[in-house]
């Protein structure tokens, strides 16, 4: 599933390839991925110019400037699990599962949204609606200050892995980079956010920043579906240290990496480098973790 580094890569690609361009025509090929009325979606997007591209967490917001009577609107893109945003030549063959086409003025290139599993969503909204959406998310994991990060963990007694995945706590992290950051910080995924020491919390903040910076610089991680705006895969896969490395030796100490399930999500960690604390988050019987 695309996480912050992948969405940031798409965001940068849109700034490079779409900024200042006018959307001449919109075609919706599958209405199920549109939030709201598809006809209204097309009406609000057509004829507008891409004025800016914003991101918070995993959410992309494209500012669409129009004529005076139209005002400004926003195109919200959520990639879901398998969503892809590319800019291609209008003459390129249409791939299966392409759901939206936005043809730029001049008619030579278009933005395409493709999503095999159809969990991604597109919508057009007002500034007020965008502000409400961004307000519902926790501080962006890449842009958050240390103080914001530490404040967000207060009162949280569930598993720290679950807290990192909760977009209302800190937005942008998913399974991949949460596992990698916890390993970098030497924190067990079942530790409780409010019970870890202040030093450990600060270490985790720095680990999140470090891991995300590395991943963004390498255009994210591709296992199967994710590609950037040009159709290229991310380059971070070879840099992963614990995610999906079950049974492989820890890159620090050589201990086999373990996998447990927390709230239905896989978590990968080194049982030696990430020691299990005495007090851990409670788990259901079917999710008991080995010590």
Image: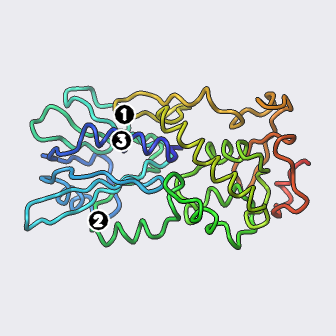
Q: Are marks 2 and 1 in contact (CB under 8 Å)?
A: no
Q: CA distance from mark 2 to mark 1?
A: 28 Å
Residue that badge 3 annotates: 12
Label placed on residue 96: 1
Q: In front here: 61 or 16?
A: 16
Please name the residue shown 58% across and 29% down the image.
237
Please name the residue shown 74% across and 67% down the image.
194
Q: In front here: 91 or 148?
A: 148
Q: CA distance from mark 2 to mark 3?
A: 21 Å
| Labels 3 and 1: the sequence-earlier one | 3
Task: Report helix, strand or loop for mark 3.
Answer: helix
Residue 131 on image: x %, y %? 36, 69
Mark toward the viewer: 3 or 1: 3
Answer yes or no: is residue 172 visible: yes
- Left or right of residue 119: residue 159: right
Mark toward the viewer: 2 or 1: 2
Q: Quadrant of residue 96?
A: top left
Q: Quadrant of residue 243?
A: top right
- At label 1, counting other C-alpha atoms closer than 10 Å, the crowd grade (few under 14, some 14-19, many 20 or more) is few
Please name the residue shown 11% across and 41% down the image.
105
Residue 104 on image: x %, y %? 16, 41
Above or below 128: residue 149: above
Task: Report helix, strand or loop for mark 2.
Answer: strand
Label placed on residue 159: none
Label placed on residue 125: 2
Residue 232 on image: x %, y %? 41, 27
- Left or right of residue 246: residue 211: left
Above or below 182: residue 282: below
Residue 107 on image: x %, y %? 12, 35
Mark toward the viewer: 2 or 3: 3
């Amino acid at each position: 599933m695309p996480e912050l580094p992948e969405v940031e890569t798409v965001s940068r690609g849109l700034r490079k390839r779409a900024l200042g361009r006018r959307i001449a025509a919109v075609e919706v090929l599958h209405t199920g991925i549109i939030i709201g009325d598809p006809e209204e979606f097309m009406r609000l997007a057509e004829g507008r110019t891409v004025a800016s591209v914003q991101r918070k967490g995993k959410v992309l917001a494209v500012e669409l400037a129009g004529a005076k009577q139209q005002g400004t609107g926003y195109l919200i893109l959520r990639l879901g699990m398998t969503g892809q945003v590319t800019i291609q030549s209008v003459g390129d063959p249409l791939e299966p599962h392409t759901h939206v086409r936005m043809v730029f003025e001049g008619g030579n290139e278009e933005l395409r949204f493709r999503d095999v599993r159809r969990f991604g969503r597109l919508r057009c909204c007002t500034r007020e609606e965008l502000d409400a959406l961004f307000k519902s998310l926790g501080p962006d994991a890449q842009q958050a200050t240390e103080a914001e990060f530490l404040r967000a963990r207060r009162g949280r007694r569930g598993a720290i892995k679950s807290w990192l995945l909760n977009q209302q706590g800190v937005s942008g992290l998913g399974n991949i980079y949460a596992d990698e950051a916890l390993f970098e910080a030497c924190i067990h995924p079942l530790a409780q956010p409010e019970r870890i020491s202040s030093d450990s919390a600060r270490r985790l903040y720095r680990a999140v920043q470090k891991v995300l910076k590395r991943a963004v610089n390498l255009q994210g991680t591709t296992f199967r579906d994710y590609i950037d705006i040009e159709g290229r895969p991310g380059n971070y896969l070879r840099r992963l240290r614990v995610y999906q490395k079950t049974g492989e030796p820890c890159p620090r100490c050589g201990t086999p990496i373990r996998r447990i399930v927390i709230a239905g999500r896989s978590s990968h960690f080194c049982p030696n480098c990430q020691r299990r604390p005495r007090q851990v988050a409670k788990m259901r019987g079917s999710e008991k973790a080995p010590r």
